[in-house]
Amino acid sequence: MKIGIVCYPTYGGSGVLATELGIALARNGHEIHFITYKRPARLTHFHENVYFHEVDTEQYPLFEYTPYDTALTSKLVDVVQHEGLDLLHVHYAIPHAAVAYMAKKILLTQGRYIPVVTTLHGTDITLVGKDKSFAPVVEFSINKSDGVTAVSESLRQQTYDTFNLTREIEVIYNFIDFSRFRKSNKDHFKKAIAPKGERILIHVSNFRKVKRINDVVQVFYRVNQQMPSKLLFIGDGPERRAAEDLCRELDIIDDVRFLGKQDAIEELMAVADVFLMPSESESFGLAALEAMACEVPVISTNAGGLPEVNIHGETGFLSNVGDVEDMARNAIIILSDEEVLTRFRENALAQAKRFDIQEILPKYEAYYESILKAA
Ligand code: GMT
């Protein structure tokens, strides 16, 4: 198949997932065209069958806001026509589903039907999507997609609860590529980070409010009082400064490292003992899955789709949003006994294998086939 993939090219989970999906599809012989405003962060190498079309947005003094939607629509029309695409797969409803609908309508005037699959990733429904300023367009464009997928049962249900939908939503979970995400020996890193053999806790995100970064600090503070430990913060975003201030206030800054955005996340996961994800809302929690694939147990909230990924008492623990005492207690249970930690590590890996890309990729391929057949 010739597939156009539209996504956010940044470090967010939806862009990561879309890029990894495109690369894996290309490896399976499909021709993949990424269409977005910047090279996707995870598209780091040349891949046979992978193309990238940059959307250029014209600056003009009249525009206070550059009309990206219009530029993207025009690019989609162009790429579908000239590359002969069979299908468009857009990730994150806003604005991609609406843009794809517009491109589809334009192409129809030229006698060309392009089926559109929309994948809902989370905040496009749970936070931003249901806001009054977007909701009518999100609802309309989901209903007008030829196929709609959500990354967890929880997100599917929330979408039905939020919008008036006439479309079936198929759940296709986030996946993990074990050729990249697996535990490797990084003892030299470990020694550099925790020279006295301290336990290492880790958090990876884009530091948005929904991630509750201060809860990461509060949990670590409590663990740190009970055992020698270090905390690694990977990523960057609006809440970072407040988290740094809190670490200073609690006098734990010497045990905390803010490493900023990193590409080789798996190398850092390799040295970690526990992954912290105290999110307020999380449709799936791709970063938690990446941790589990590297044999790192997860301390998370029970928000959204997290219980579908992190199994309470087996691969980690779940707590109510904001309950930092409970999260710290649970982390200490895992970290204070080597045998317990080993058991949780093994369970985390076994659970991650359920989301192996080899299992999930055929689901996307079968879904595309069914959409093309129906079109
Ligand atoms: O979590 C983020 O801030 C990034 C966000 C995105 O939209 O790119 O991630 C969402 O999509 C991921 C991939 O499907 C999911 O694993 C994340 O759980 C989801 N984030 C939220 O629901 C907050």
Image: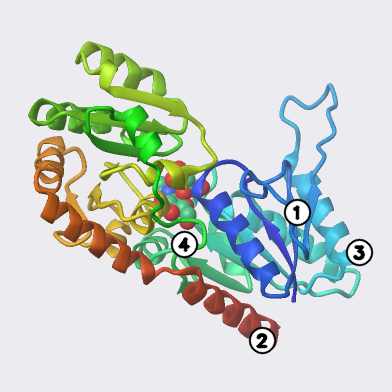
Q: CA distance from mark 2 to mark 1?
A: 34 Å
Ligand 1 within 8 Å of disc 4? The answer is no
Element type at marker 3? Answer: helix
Answer left or right for 45 relative to 211. Answer: right
| Spatial separation of the CA atoms under disc 4 and disc 3 | 33 Å
The residue beneath circle 4 is 176
Q: Choose the circle earlier in sequence order: 4 or 3.
A: 3
Q: Are marks 2 and 1 in contact (CB under 8 Å)?
A: no
Marks 1/3 in contact by CB < 8 Å: the verdict is no
Q: Which mark is residue 374?
A: 2
Residue 246, quarter of picture: top left
Q: Which residue is mark 3?
A: 82
Task: Tell whether label 3 touches label 4 (CB within 8 Å).
Answer: no
User: With 14 as the anchor, is 248 left or right in this view?
Assistant: left
In the rendered structure, which amino acid carries the disc numbered 2? Ala
Label 1: which secondary element: loop
- Camera-nearest residue between 158 and 321: 321
- Badge 1 or badge 3: first in the primary sequence: 1
Badge 4 vs badge 2, beta-carbon distance below 8 Å: no
Q: Which mark is residue 122?
A: none
Disc 1: which residue? 46
The kind of secondary structure element at disc 2 is helix
Horizontal and vertical percent for residue 206? 46, 36
Taking depth in this image into account, of 327 and 29 the one nearest to the observer is 29
Marks 4 & 1, CB-CB < 8 Å contact: no
